[in-house]
Structures are given as C-alpha cells and as structure tokens.
Image (cartoon, rainbow, N blue to C red):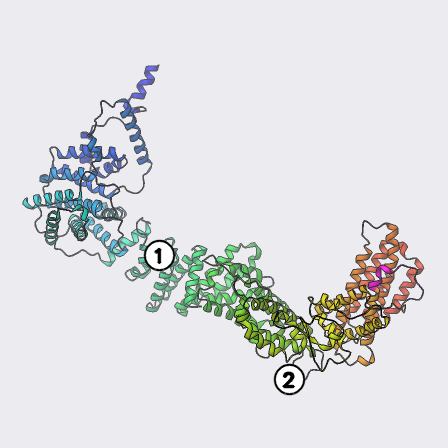
Amino acid sequence: MEDIEIRWKEDPLFGVLNSLPEINHAVMFELVKSMSFSSIYVELLLCLPSAERYEELKLFVDHVTSRSTEEDVKMFLEVWWELLKGKRGCNDDVDQFFSTQASRSKMNETSTQASKRFKPDPESTSISMVHILFEGLREIKEHLANPEMCYVALSNCLDTMYTNYLLSSAAELPIEIKLQRISCIVNLKKRKMLMEDFDMIENIQEAHRDLSASLIPAETNPSGMTFIQAMQVTLEVICSWEVMGLLNPFEGEPTFAVVRLKDSIGRVLASLEHPHGKDLIGNGQTLSNLRVSLTGLMGSLAFKDLESSAAEMVTICTSILDNHLEGFEDLPGLFATKLSQDFNEAEWIRCLERNARMFQTKDLLLSLITALTNKCQRDPDVQCCKNLKDVVVEIFSNLSIADRNATLADLLNVSSKGLHQFLPSSISKDFSEELNLAFNSIIQSGASQSLDAAVAAVARVAFQNPEATLNRCYQMAVFNLGAHTLIAEILQQLPGLFSSNRAHHDNLVCNCLKNTVWSKLLSPQEENQFVQFIAEMMKCNMTTHTGEKQSFIPPENVLRTFVQPFLLKTPQLSNLEFCLRILQCTLSQDSSTDATHWLMSCSPFPLLFCLAQLLNECSRCWDQPVEGERTMSMEIKELLLSALHTAGTLVGKEVVCAPDTWSRALFWLYNKVEEMDWTVGFCLKDVWGEHFKYEVPSSMLSVCDLPEHDWSGLELPQYGQGTGLVAWLECCALSDVVHKTTLEHLSLNLLKPDDVNMFSKGLLVGVCQILPWCTCGEWERILEVIKKLLKSGKLHVPYSLEYVDFLPLLDLRSFAYELRLSIFLLRIFQLLCSSSCSDWLQSQGWLHTGRLYANAMRSIISSVKDKSSLNSDTASPKTSGSLSQEVLFVLTQLFCHVLHVQVMIPDQPKVLFLCALEILTHYEAVISAFPDSCSALQGLNTRHFFTTIADNLQCSDMKAVLHQKIAQL
C-alpha cells in the first residue's frame, strides 16, 4: 500500500512532489518555433524570477545560435521583440500558478538534486538580458537572409539600447500622435492579412504594445554590458549587413519593419545629441561612428511618413471607445474636441451616447459643451443638435455631486443662463416643460422623495438654465406652504450655484429673488415664509469645493438688496415693516469668520442714522396724520428698537476693537443724532461706548443721583420742572442695563411720608404720560420697575374696597403685590380715560393701550396661579382649601378691574374681554378643585355679582358669552 502511495505521487502525470515535470529544452524550443508560440513562451518566461529567467533565456539563445536556420533567427527576433514589449497586462491566474509552481520546483531541485543540476558560472548571475540578446545577435548576424530581418533585428537593438541606456523616465506621446501611429501600424498589418482573419481590437491592442515598448525605461539595470559595448555590437552588425548588401537604400511600399526602424533610428539619434558623458570617456569615436552609420541608414529610408485618413482614424477611435481599451485615457478629450469635426455628426453622437460613461468628468463635459455650441452655430439640423444636447445633459446628470457643482460654477462664471446661453431657442424651447416636470415631481413627492433625488432633479435643470431654475426655486419656497425648508436644503447641496465670481453670483442670486418674489408678496403668510426662507439661506450650512463653510445668500447681500434701498429713501410703511423684519433676520446671523463683522462692510453708520431717523418719528405715532408725513405703528417702533439695539451692539464691538478706524464716522453719527429726541441717542449707547456719556434730560437728575462720570444732563425745553419722573420712567423703559442703576440712585427718603406720597402720585401721572407710546418690551420693563418699587415700599398704593360689599375675613398678604399692582393699573386708566385726557389718542392708540393692560393683567393672573399651586404635592388639603378662598377673592377683584378698564376704554377692546374669560376659567378650576371653598349661597351671590359687572359691556355678543360662562360657575 505504501509503494502505491509513493508511486502515484512520483508519477510525472500526477506530479505532487514534482509540480513541473522535467523539460527537454530542445524539444520545447522546436515546438515554439513550429507553432509560432513566441509570445506564449515569453509570457511564461516573464513569470520566472530574474535569475531563472536569464538562465532560461541563455538556454534559448544557445539553442538558436547553434546550427541556426532562418526560422531560428526569426524566432529569436520575435522573442526579443516580445521581451521588449513586456507582459500583456497584469498576471492572470494561470501566470500566478505557473510562477508559484516554478519557484516551488526550483526550491525542490535545489534541495534534493543540487549535485545533478546545472550550476551556472558565478559571474553569469550578473549577466543581464541585454548582454544575452546582444551576444546572441552577434553570433547569428551572418544568418540573417533578407533586409526585412535586418530591419527587425536592428530595431530591436536600437530600442533595447534606447530603453536601457538613454531613456530615464517614461515618455508619453500626445494622443493625436499616438492615434496616428497606431492607425498606421494597424493599416500596415491589415494589408498582409485577409479581411476575415483581421481582428481590429486585437491589432489595436498589439499596436499599442508595439508603440509603448520604446517609451518605457527598462525595469532592470543592464549589468554585464556597458553602453559602449552595446554601441559596438550595434556598429558591428550594421557593418556586417552593409557588407552583405542587406541595408541598401529602401525602395517600394513601406512595411511595418521599415517604419519601426525609421522611428527607432530617429529616437536614438535625438538622444545621442546629449549622451551620458560618464560612459563615453575615451570612446567618442565609437559614438561618432554610430551616429554616422545611423544617419546614413536614415537617409536610405527616404520615404514619406505614413498618415491615416480621417475615415481610418474614425474607425480606430470608435473601436477604442466602444471596447474601453486601456492606455487611451486622453482619447475622450480628443474625441470631444478635434475629432468631432472628422466624424459624421450622427455617427459621432451615436458613439458618444454609447460611451457616455467615459465622458463623466467636468473637463470633458465642458469640451462637449463647446462642441455642441459650435455645431449649433454651423449646423441647421435642429434634431441632431437636440440629440447632442440631451446626451450632454445626461452626462452632466451622471457626474458626481462634486463635479456637478464644479461644472455649474464654471458655467455661472460665463453666464447666468448656463447651457442655454450657447444654444438657439429652437434647441431649448422644451425646457419650460422639463422645468415644470422637475418641480411638480418635487411638490408631489414631498417628504417621500429623498433629498438626493430632489438635488439631482434641480441640478439637471440648473445646468441648462441656472437663472430660470433659481426663479422657480424661489417661487416654490415662498408661495408653497412649508416648502421653504426643502428648497433651502436642496440649494445648500448645490454650492456650484455659488459662483466663484462673487459679484456675478450675488447679482444673480439676489436679483432672481428680488424680481421673482419681492414684488409679488400678497399675504402675511407669504411674507413670513419669505423671511424664514431668507433665514435658512443665510445660515452657513453650505460647504464649497474648497471645504469652506458659507451661506448660499450672505447676509450682507440680503441687507444691500432688500433693506438699504428701502431705508435710504422714504419708504412706504407697508414696505418698512417688512424691511425691518428682514433686517433683524440678517443681524441675527453670526459672522462666518473671526475677522471684522460683515455688517461693517455695509455702511453701518448711515444705516444706524436711517434707523435713528425712523425711531425719532415714532414719538408721533398716535398724532393726527399730517399730509405728507408718515405715521409709524407700534410694530414698526418695536422692530426699530430691536434692530437699533442689535446693530448698535455689533458696531460698538467693532468700534472698541479699532477706535481709530471708526472715530470719524462715530462723531458724524453723534452730531446727526444730537438733533433728534434724546431717547434715540440713549438707544445708541452701545455704539458710543466710552466716547460719550449717558445723556438724559436735566430734570431727571433732580430725582435720581447718578454718577457724573457716566451721566450728563441735557437742557430740553419740553422737560421742564416736574418732568423728572417722566424722564426717569422713559429711561427705565429703554434699557434693561440701566434698571439697577436708576433704581439704586433714586432720590427718595422713605422716612418722609410726604415724599413717598408725592413720588407715588407723580409716578402714577408719569406712567399715564408714557404708557400709550410704550412698545410691549418697554411696557414689560416699566412693569418690572413698578414691581420692584412696590416690593421695596417706595411706591405707596392703598387698596380700596370699591368692589367689596363686606369685609372678607381672609389673609390676603400673600397676594398683596398682585392686588396693589392691579389697583395701580386701574388708577392709571381712570386718569387716562378721564375727560381731561379723552382726546389724547386715536382708536388705534386706545387699542394698543388696552393690549398693554391685558398683557400686564395676564402676568398678574399667572403670578396668582403660581402662588395658589393647586396641584402642589406639598400643600395639605386643609391649607389648599383655605388658600382657595383667597384665590377666589383675588380673581373676583381682578375680574372687576379688567371689566372696569374695558368699559372705560373707547370701543371696549376685545383683548380685555378675553382676559376676563381667562379669569373666569381659572375661577371655575379653583371651585372644581375645592368645592368647599364656596357655599351655594356664596356661589349664587358671586354669579349675580359677576353678571351685574358684565352687564356694563356694550357688545351684546361679549356680554352673552360672559353670562354663559358665569352661569357655569
């Protein structure tokens, strides 16, 4: 059994231990010669390690040079030429398997049969392939029987010498020359073959190998033979063949061998003009002789260089592209430019369609656009141009997102019309339908469509016409409810629309937005969506091709386009409020860099001056309108104050950082503002910084001991004696920053009751004077001041029992602040609605004042709710029930105060009716939570009391709703 196991392993047909059987080299070489397997032999030879390769090559040359025949010489030249051309692509599985087995076999032979194997001369390990081949040629030079063989042999010599000694780095032929030479090689080989045997693709690939063989330096050093020795061998064979008459002047039709020899001689002669000096010391004569011989040979090959026809070039190019042959990476660029003129247009477009994937780069696409433009200008065939345009658009659509953006940027630098800029209207007339289809698809798909698909659809139409695409994007973003977020996300994925030509981009993006949307906004919803869209587009969410974070629409451009043109001239009130909202939106955007804020590039001081002028006009907001003058609304005043504060803060920081740069502009603004109301300059304190003090009416300094190094008085005629508290309240209303300072320095001696009493009455009158002209923000600051004055005891507000029939036996100290503030507000409106003040305000003024009062009462109601804490886990049922009676009493008083004020105010504003309903709702919640807090009789009396109070309302609808609500208590 063991013998059988050993025998089958050692059997040559099942060589496990002998992976490769013993080879009879003579038989193998004769097989290669008879079957014309030179290329296969070289492929296997190149799979061997270097030492084994040279050993095998030496055996081959020895076989060829012994008793040489013409067939031996032919095989030798073919093997040499194949070795020059190298491997055909990468090693495949067979090559790798053969290489592995050869290495394993060599290792086995070395270890088991070392004594029986051929041992090469130690010096032979340094012998290179060049030495072996040149020496082989020297030995068989007399056996070359015809000029054709001599041309091949000499070409091999010269190319070997060139790639081993003269070429230092790979040379790359221009694609036009490469195509011309490959076409010539293919045509020369085609003449020798029958059409049915001719494989165009195989011959193109082989011609490319032939051409590349002499353009790539040898991978190994030519050890064993110097450059001089190689030249000497070359001279020797040339002289020998000249004596034999094999190198006579060439006559007749050029063959591939002749054309190749002419190219080889030309390359070597050009390189010998600047040879390597270190190899030529003392051997200048050899170099000179070689030059003379080669020059003479070049002269004997005096035939005209072959050139292929346009049709032949077209065939070669089409075959290369259709079969995606390697080594022709530059061909698509040539095809898109110069070759487009050689092709039949229809054939050129069909080839482009078939191979569109090979043109999916930005540069090739731009070349195709140029070709399309040229064809449209000279070709009346509209359908042909349409087909080409469709191919170009399809190629763009299949680009990577980075290349799509780069292409869009390049197009935008030329024109805002994109591809359509270069096309006649007959080619682009169907674009509107494609544009509608793209955006209808986005609208219908909505959230179900992926963002990538939406971006691709928009990019496709933007490539054809960026301006029209942006117009449609803006229309959809503003006029389709909720679409602004999606459109912003899409555009932020297309930084290519953000042209590197910044001025051109700004003009395009903002003008499209202005022309498409700005003048067509009809409803508050559309205005709101416009502002929201602008805010999204100003965010730095877009990454450019340089990796920089930028906004699609920079805030400074929004400011220049939608704000400054309307503020610098006399704006209409309808536009003014909208512009101020946009301004506030832009100012809320952070600067994209740590350098100077973007606002400083937008004429910030004239902007502040315009805002200050407008704020100065707001002091007349409730005056009777005079013909030719504007009447500002409270909404506009609130926006102006907010914008002025934000812009002032930003500008003030920059002024602090560079005071010398901005000092002149700062003093210019200060001089301008001096002519306005003092409150305007006060609002600009963030801009003034340390340059100017807080400037307030001098009368205010009589009621407030403010430090002189920060505050100074202004002698103003409208602020005479007794107006100090009014100025003080105005100052408190303007800024949160000065609250603490003004309260701390208030001149009031609590030990003098008369002073406290006079201060309380003066404060009441002062609040009456400024309340109607307060914005919501200013009124909140005033309420905060009143709250602190009440809690500190500086404001004396006795609580009267005008809505109490019997003395309540309750502890109301927990709600003292809420009750006193409510009665203080009631006294304000009793004075404000008295006959002496009845002509102060128009109906809009009363409505605004009622709104401010409702806001104050809601804050009081919230405070009562917070203190009652009906859902508190810490309060015991007994305590909560007792507290609920006090809450009911307080809510009753608040209800009476609200309806009292509503009845006093002209037109009885609805906002106070809603406030009263809110009080009743909370009253009902307390009773539901604690039924014992109110007996049946008390409930009946309360409902009757509430009904009596509600009967004072003029509006029957309001009265009916209150009655219904009261009946449910």
Mark 1 lies on residue: 352
Above/below status of 155 relative to 696:
above
Left or right: 193, with 549 as reference point: left
The span from disc 2 to disc 1 (Cα, nearest Å) is 68 Å
| Crowding at mark 2 (Cα within 10 Å: few <14, some 14-19, many 20+) | few
**Residue closer to the observer: 485 or 163:** 163
**Residue closer to the observer: 162 or 211:** 162
Report the quarter where the N terminus lies.
Answer: top left
Quarter location, residue 887: bottom right
Rendered image: mark on residue 530: none
Left or right: 378, with 808 as reference point: left
| Crowding at mark 1 (Cα within 10 Å: few <14, some 14-19, many 20+) | many
Can you give x and y, in whole percent of width and height, for residue 259 in the image? 17, 51
Rendered image: mark on residue 628: 2
Which of labels 2 and 1 is toward the front?
2
Which amino acid, mark 1?
Answer: Leu
**Residue closer to the observer: 295 or 19:** 295
Which is nearer the N-term, disc 2 or disc 1? 1
Which amino acid, mark 2?
Answer: Gly
The single residue placed furthest to the bottom in the displayed view is: 627
Can you give x and y, in whole percent of width and height, for residue 316 in the image? 27, 53
Can you give x and y, in whole percent of width and height, for residue 118 in the image? 21, 26
SS of the residue under disc 2: loop
Q: Which residues are magenta?
A: 806-818
Can you give x and y, in whole percent of width and height, for residue 8 in the image? 31, 20
Circles 2 and 1 in contact, beta carbons < 8 Å: no
Q: Please say whether residue 323 is one of the residues in the magenta stretch.
A: no
Report the quarter where the C terminus lies.
Answer: bottom right
Q: Is residue 914 visible?
A: no
Above/below status of 767 relative to 391:
below
Q: Is residue 312 visible?
A: yes
